[in-house]
Every structure is written in structure tokens, then in C-alpha cells.
Image (cartoon, rainbow, N blue to C red):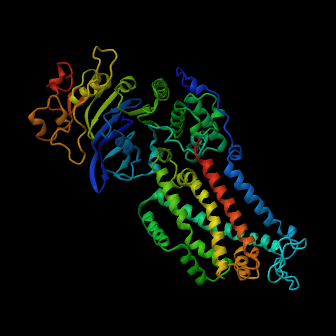
Amino acid sequence: MTAGPAAGVPLTDDDQAPIGSRASFGARAVRTPAFVAGVSVTGVIVLLALLAPVIGRYSPVQQNLLATLQGPSAAHWLGTDEFGRDIWSRLLYGGRTDLQVGVLAVLFPFCFGSLLGTLCGYLGGSLDAIVMRVVDVVLAFPFYVLIIALVFFVGEGTHGIFIAFALTDWVVYTRTTRGAALVATSQDWVAAAEGGGLSRRRVLLRHVLPNTISQAIVYAMSDIVLVILAVVTLGYLGLGIQPPAPDWGAMISDGQAFITVHPWLSIIPGIAIIVTGVGLSLIGDGLADLQRPQ
Amino acid sequence: MSPLLEVSDLTVEVQRQRRVFRAVDGVSLCLPDGGSLGIVGESGSGKSMTLRAVMGLLPRAARVRGGTVRVAGELVTARGERSSADRRRHRLAMIFQDPLAALDPVMTVGAQVAEAPRRVGGLSARAARERALGLLRLVGIPDPARRYASYPHELSGGLRQRVMIAVALSADPAVLLCDEPTTALDVTIQAQILALLQDLRDAQGLGLVFVTHDLAVVGQICDQIAVMYAGRIVETGPAAAVLGAPRHPYTAALLASAIDVDSARQVPQAIPGAVPDPFRPPPGCPFQPRCPIAQPDCAAGPVPLRDIAPGRSAACLHHDMLADGPAPAGPGHG
């Protein structure tokens, strides 16, 4: 290319208008109320969970059979349970466990499902047909029936939960991203990228995937909530995190025996779950808002 | 010397709801070095499909069923193969009708222009950036260093179209295939983009294939013209000659339907009827049911494209009727 700028091609005022200062992602995020609220709520919970060893004051498994089922006091801010364990400490450590399991259990389905869905939408053909039939089969089972059956099969505890979610949860990401990839693939910019001689791998990873992944990220936020709820449900059924490790689900089910006389044993971890769920959902909502073109 | 781009007998079939029709039926085109060819026709005439078949970018439902595409004498596409290596080697690039849809929404425009030089051309990141800036400057984008980091939705329509041209040029093409590049733009910007493409053709020796339904655009920047109707070429020749004295009634009707401020005729003439159902093409000449000069023999059998004058051909049995008299005025005549 030797010629200079295309001379004799006047520009309109529109083209010469100053480049509007684009608000960075951070600047726009700060102005999105749902996102700010979600990040604040979730941030506080994550911080409390991380600081559990510092602010917990007691070990979550340390029993004190001389001080069981006490109400709130200076020594035990939220009282003690039937074994005299400090509820405040168990709440913090339980959050640690549940958040960790929630994030880790979503990680594999998110990565694998999104990649597979994007690949199916982009390539189509027999891969797409086969994968989508498998997705249909997995989706045909009621979610909890499938999870409980799998946890029974592979064994309870955290690794059972990870395996059960790895096997079932990817389908949602695959469905979501496949749809987005189908839309993207029919756009001219995919044709333009292919027409420019780029490899299909490059087009897939650099052009199609960035356009499909945002929906998967939004879903992943509510999915973490779903996993935590599932862990709690499984814990309640005795299939989740195994005692004496602290976990909100186990706390709720343990407190059930005393629900009429000491309802806070179940109510306190219940509130913790609700607040975490609201926080993560708000982040998801906020991200969805942020992605909408202005 | 072989022509820059030569398309022979290209046939494309499209499947729709388990039925197949021919969207492009035996189309042959020839673009000499540094030439510019306009393909005109109504929506659904197969002009865009022809372009995408040449580029190897057909949608999934469409297949090349026959014909060859040669760039500088070398065979590029046959039977619907999609090979990016082919396109790279033969240096075809395409610009699209809607620039917003043809640019990746989540990638900065600079990165999109730099991508082909970096990934295909093998330049270093810095050299690719320099080249991208050079291309953005070439297509007339003011202050390219600052626009480099813009996203497509932050640019005006005209700038987007310029960026898309820069992306197309980044693959260093010999032929630029333009699919209605000005349709989505308003008139002043249209003129700028046309001037830019003309500049590129003159300065870089770039071959242009221009698909449009705007006859004025063809008259302005193309030296050859091919008129398509129902998947076939019905008339070809030098643009000035064909537009000045059409020898196919469809070309004449297209001209009559265009707004012409210079002529005394105020009201554009609509072409009566509609484009034929692709699944049930009419017998004989496909334009025959709408044609003002149709004769009984027009429906008898296929009407091939025949040479009618040096460098001109038309697919009409009765092109002589148009040769002398004025163009038919449209409905109600003939």
C-alpha cells in the first residue's frame, strides 16, 4: 500500500466528531445499581468466609458440652448448638465450605459446556446433532433426582458433588452458548473473518467464543447459587458435606430437632444462604445489564 | 493473459424446507485486470449468492453444484469446498452490506484490521499494528491511532464501512467483492464510500465486483455490467452501453423503475408482477410472464445468453425490438 489517504473523499461532520469518551467497564459497572449491590453483598460474605480463622473466635468443631444450646452472649455472639459449638464460627466456616464447593462445582461445567456449545453452534453438522440429543436426555431427568442418584452412585461428600455437577450441569451452558453461537455464526463478521483467511480455530476462539461466553458468565452467577442450594439440600438429606465439617445445609438439618425451642439454629444458616443467593443473583443481573448495548 | 477473476457456469442450489431450488443458474462472469464489474438485479435474483459462492462463504443451506471460479487463471472453488487456504492464496476479499453486522462487536476495530496481517501474513504484533494504522489511514479514517481502540458500535455508519474496507484490504486482496456496500448508508456517505472504492481501484489496481440494485452506482464506478434475473444473467456488456441502450426488456424495465431527475419522466415505472417462485420457474424465459414485449415463442423453451453485438450479450429472443425504438415504458405497453 503506497498511496496516501484517499484524497478527495470529504468526511462528514459526523465522522470528524470527537471520539466520545467511552466509559470503561469499571465506570459503567459503578453506575449499575444491581451490580454494585451484588458485589457489595457477595464481597462481604466472601470476606467473612475468608477471615473465618481470624474472626471466628472458636474452632467450628470444638465442642463444649457444658454450654449447649445457649442463646446469644458476649462469649458466643450467636449462641451455641446442641454440642456447645459456637454458631458464629460454624456459620463462617460453613460459608467457606459452601462458597468453595459452589464455585469449584460450576467451574468445569462452565468451561466444558460453553466450549462445547460454541463449537456445536459454529460447526453444526453431526457433532451438533449428537451433542444436542445428549443434552436433551440429560435435561429430561428432574435435576434433583439426577443429582441425588449420582451422588449415591459416586459417593457423598464434596467430590461426589463435584462429579455429579460435572456430569449434569454442562448441558445448560451448552444449550445457552450454542444458541448464541448460532446467531453469531450467521452474522457477516464471521464470514468476514473466514474470508480474511483466518483458520476456523482462530475464528472460533477469537471471534465466536467471546460473543457467546458473556451469556454463560451471567448464568454461572445464578448457577453458583443453585449449586450451593443443592449442596445444602444434599447436606440436609445427609448426602452432602460430611460431619463434623461445618456446612449451612447440615446446620439447618441439625437444628431441625430443636426447631420449636431453639429456632435460630436453623434460621441463622437459612438467612446466610438467602443473603448469599441474593448477592450472587444481583451480580448476574448487573452483568446482564452491563452487557446490554447502551 | 488470463483474466483476474473468471467465473464459469456457476450453479448454486439452496435447500429450503426440504425443497431445492437453483439460486444461481449457470452464471459466467469475467473481470479483467484492474476492471470493475457491476452485478445488478432485484432482491432474490441471486446476485449476492453468486458473490458468496465465489468467495466460498455460502450459508449452510446452499451448495455449489457446478462451475468453476478462477483467480488469475488458477482454480479456486469447485463444488462448494470451503478452504481458507484457497482464499488466502488467491486473494479475494469481500465487503458486506451492513458494516455493523460485518464487524465483530466485541473486538476493537484496530485489532480486527491487524488480525489478518498478524495471523495470516505472519507479521509481528508491532508490524501488524503499523500496517493496520496504515490501512485505517488509507481508507480515510481521521486520527487512526485514536480510533484503533474503538469498538464498532462507537463509530458512525460511514466510518464503520471504512473500517470494513480496511479489514478487507488487510488480507491484501487482488479482487474486492462488494455486496451492496452502500445500501445501508445515507446518500452523502454513499458517495464518499464510492469515491474511496474508486480511488482504491485506481491507486492499487484492485479489481472490483460490485453487487447492487442501484443502477446509478453501477454507471458511476463500473466499466462492465451483468444484469441478473431469477438466478441467471440476462444481459452483459460495457456499463455505459447497456445502461444507455438496454437490449433485454428486464434491463429496460429496471432503468424505467429508477428515479431519474434529468428526464422529463417524473414517476418511476414499477415492473408489473413479481419475481417468479424459485420452486416453480415459468416455462422458457423466466422474465416472460412480466415482459412487455413477450411473444408466444418466449415460453417455448430456455432462452440462452447470446452475443448480440461485440462485447455484449443478452438472453432475449426479441432483443431486436429494443435495438431501435425507445425503451418500453413499462406496463400497458407492448
Taking B256 as reference, is A44 left or right? right
Instruction: Check the image and report above or below for A217 versus A63.
Output: above
For the C terminus of chain B, give its image quadrant.
Answer: top left
* Closest to the observer, B139 or A92: A92
The number of discs equals 0
Quadrant in the picture for residue B262: top left
* Residue depicted at 53% across the width and 42% down the height: B103
Q: Residue furthest left?
A: B296
* Residue depicted at 60% across the width and 40% down the height: B151
Q: Where is residue B268 in the image (x, y as percent from the top left)?
A: 29, 23
* Residue B263 seen in render: yes
Taking B49 as reference, is A177 left or right? right
* Residue depicted at 52% across the width and 22% down the height: A9
* Residue B74 seen in render: no
Q: Where is residue B146 in the image (x, y as percent from the top left)?
A: 66, 33
* Closest to the observer, B248 or A82: A82
Q: Where is residue B178 in the image (x, y as percent from the top left)?
A: 42, 35
For the N terminus of chain B, give its image quadrant.
Answer: top left
Instruction: Check the image and report above or below for A116 versus B95.
Output: below
Quadrant in the picture for residue A219: bottom right
* Closest to the observer, B149 or B118: B149
Taking A185 as reference, is A266 left or right? right
Q: Where is residue B86 in the image (x, y as percent from the top left)?
A: 44, 48
Q: Residue furthest right?
A: A74
Q: Residue furthest bottom?
A: A65
